[in-house]
């Protein structure tokens, strides 16, 4: 796979998963794993509208290694609660550093927005992300739609089937389609899926 595409995937993949702002005092920790890539991140919601986070990504290729470390600020811009449903609009900005084994080290900047809507059985989300790093300014659009075959209580396994579409305009207009399964149990979330080209990923997330 193209190194620049992997660079983009390694940083932006997890921006599309979960709510970046939860509840006051809430702590989120997560790990995201793909072929040749691992990412760890943590997020703390210090106000019901704002959170601070940190992220570390390690990408290993045959001829190139990339390490990314950054901090980010997340804001809940808008929320609408209705009986049995919720809609949210989030914004994220961040900065960090890229350590590239081929010498493309430097400052990393990123930003993104996320609009989502969910009920107990239906979920959809639209996300746009941009990243600025040495010799690279990629964009990404993501759309997710999913459903739960059944409703579950807090202490029961709750499974969701989700289809994810991603568009990378600067990667020759690459479009990626990924079916995935999301499972909740108490405050733990698992996501596992694979593109039709066999590029798998696994994410584990916990809230405290």
Image: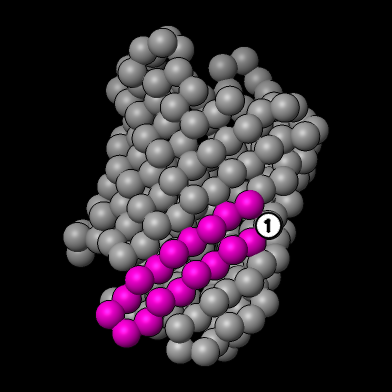
**Looking at the image, is 52 positioned above or below residue 106?**
above
Determine whether the residue tagged by mark 1 lies in a helix, strand or loop.
strand
Q: Position of residue 85 (x, y in %)?
A: 58, 23
Name the residue rendered at 40%, 25% in the picture: 184
Residue 191 x/y as whole percent: 36, 40
Q: Nearer the viewer, residue 24 or 138?
A: 24
Q: Is residue 41 left or right of residue 81?
A: left
Which quadrant, please, contains the N terminus? bottom left
> What is the magenta range?
54-70
Q: Which residue is mark 1?
A: 71
Q: Residues within 10 Å of mark 1 (few under 14, many from 20)?
A: some
Q: Quadrant of the C terminus?
A: top right
In the displayed structure, does residue 64 sit left or right of residue 130?
Answer: left
- Position of residue 187 relative to residue 98, above or below, is above
* Image x and y of residue 166, in percent: 42, 61
Looking at the image, can residue 55 be seen? yes
Which image quarter: residue 203? top left
Residue 176 in the magenta stretch? The answer is: no
Residue 24 placement (x, y as % from top left) = 74, 27
Q: Main secondary structure of the magenta part?
A: strand
Task: In the rendered view, tell whether residue 103 sits above or below residue 35.
Answer: below
């Amino acid at each position: 796979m193209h190194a620049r595409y992997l660079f983009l995937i390694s940083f932006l993949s997890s921006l599309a998963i979960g709510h970046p702002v939860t509840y006051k005092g809430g702590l989120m920790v997560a790990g995201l794993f793909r072929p040749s890539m691992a990412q760890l991140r943590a997020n703390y919601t210090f106000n019901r509208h704002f959170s601070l986070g940190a992220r570390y990504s390690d990408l290993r290729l045959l001829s190139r290694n990339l390490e990314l470390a950054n901090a980010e600020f997340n804001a809940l811009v808008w929320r609408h609660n209705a009986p049995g449903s919720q809609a949210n609009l989030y914004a994220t900005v961040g900065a960090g550093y890229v350590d590239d084994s081929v010498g493309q080290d430097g400052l990393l900047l990123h930003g993104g927005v996320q609009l989502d809507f969910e009920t107990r059985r239906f979920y959809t989300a639209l996300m746009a992300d941009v990243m600025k790093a040495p010799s690279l300014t990629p964009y990404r659009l993501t759309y997710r739609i999913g459903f739960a075959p059944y409703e579950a209580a807090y202490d029961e396994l709750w499974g969701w089937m989700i289809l994810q579409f991603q568009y990378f305009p600067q990667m020759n207009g690459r479009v990626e389609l990924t079916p995935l399964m999301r499972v909740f149990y108490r405050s733990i979330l698992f996501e596992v899926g694979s593109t039709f080209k066999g590029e798998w990923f696994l994410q584990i997330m916990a809230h405290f």
